[in-house]
Amino acid sequence: MIAEEMIEINKTSNSRINEVDFENLPFGKVFSDHMFTATYKDGVWQKAQITPFQNLSLNPATSVIHYGQSIFEGMKSYKAKDGKIRLFRPDQNINRFNISAHRMCMPEVPAALFQEGLEQLLDLDRNWVPDHKDSSLYIRPFMFATDEYIGVRPSESYMFMIFTCPVNKYYAGSVKVKIEEEYSRSMPGGTGFAKAAGNYAASLYPAKLAQNEGYNQLLWTDSTEHKYIEESGTMNVVFKSGNTIFSPAVSSTILSGITRDSILKIARDYGYNVEERKIEVAEIIKLLETGELDEAFGAGTAATIAPISTINFRGKDYELPDADSWEFATKAAADLNAMKTGKSEDRFKWNVII
C-alpha cells in the first residue's frame, strides 16, 4: 500500500556542483545535491520527499545493523546532445529490486512511487548528469530495515532511498580474473539472485585474497562442485567462441543482470548464436588452451563491459587476445552506449526520457 500524498520537495540552498571537477570523476565518491526518501510504517509507504543530500542519524539498535535486511540497485542515466536526460531500462531495475525485497522479507516498493521519485530526483539534479565521454550519472536506490529493536525477526519499518553520483569508468582497462574453487558466493536456495548487501560482504575476503595475488576479480563457481562458472565479482560474465556468444544461465545463485540481458539481445540482433546455459570450467580452459576463446568480459551497470585479459586457473594464467582486436564486445559496447546517449536509434525502446 501507499499513502495518497505528493512528493514533498525541499531544495538545497547551497549547491555543490561548482566544486566538482567533471573531467576527473572518481567512481562513487562525488554525490549530487539531493536524495529521495520514503518510509514504510504501519503497512503503508509514506513521507515521500526529496531533500538535500545529507547524513543519516540511526539508533544503535537499528535492525539493519544487526540482521542485515538491506537491498540495493545500480542504475545509470545519460545526457544526450539535445540536453535531455535518458534513463536506461528503469522498469527492469524496479522489478529486480522488488524480487530482492520479496526474498529478504521486505515490503515491495510500488513501481509508481519508485519511478516518480526517481524521475523527480533526476529532473531536479539534471545538471549533475555529465556529458563527457565514458561518463554517466550513477543511481543508487536502496532499502533497509529501521526497527529499533534487538530481536531476530523481519523489521516492521523500512527506509527507501535514492541518491545519485556522477561517475566515469569503473575499470580503466581490461581486468585479470581468477577462477575461485574454495570460497562460494552463493548457494541453491540462498540469496545469490538478489541484490542483497550481505552477498557482497561475504565476497570481499576471497576477492581480497585474489587482489593480493594481482587479480582484479574472481570468476565464481558453483558452491556444490566448483565445476561451473557463475559470475565475475560485481558482474555477470559472457564468452565468445567463433559465432557463439554464451553466458551462464541466470538461476537462484546468479544475478539476472540487466546489462547482460541487453548485451545478449544485441548479440541476437547481430545474428550471433546466443546460448544461456551451464558452462563448465573445463570447457573454458579447453577453449583457452586451443586458442578458441575469442573474448571474455564482465557485464554490469557500473562497468558496462569490462574486457578480461587474463584468466587464472589453479596457478596458471591463460591470456586472451588483446581486446582491441575483438569482434563483438567493443562493437556491442559502442552500440549500447550510442543507444543510451541518443546518438543512435533506440531500437529496443529501452530509454525513458526525463
Image (cartoon, grey):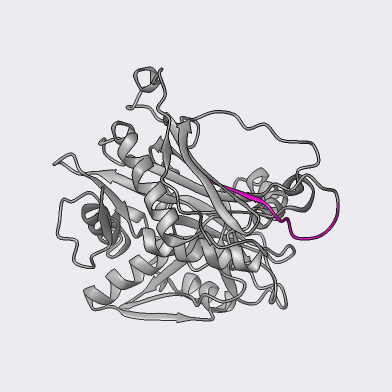
x then y, percent, for residue 31: 46, 31
Q: Which residues are magenta?
A: 151-162
Q: Nearer the viewer, residue 214 or 262?
A: 262
**Residue 130 appears left or right of 115:** left
Residue farthest right in this picture: 151
Asked whether residue 155 is drawn in magenta, I would say yes
Q: Does 342 sit above or below residue 79?
A: below
Q: Nearer the viewer, residue 211 or 345?
A: 345
Residue farthest front in this picture: 4
Q: Does 133 sit above or below residue 312?
A: above
Asked whether residue 73 is drawn in magenta, I would say no
**Residue 282 appears left or right of 260:** right
Q: Looking at the rendering, which quadrant does residue 222 occupy?
A: bottom right
Residue drawn at x 45%, y 55% is: 309
Q: Nearer the viewer, residue 261 or 314?
A: 261
Residue drawn at x 40%, y 74% is: 292
Residue 123 shows in the view? yes
x then y, percent, for residue 319: 48, 59
x then y, percent, for residue 84: 20, 43
Residue 297 shows in the view? no
**Residue 352 appears left or right of 31:** left
Residue drawn at x 41%, y 64% is: 92
Q: How many numbered marks does the figure carry?
A: 0
**Residue 227 appears left or right of 343:** right
x then y, percent, for residue 20: 38, 22
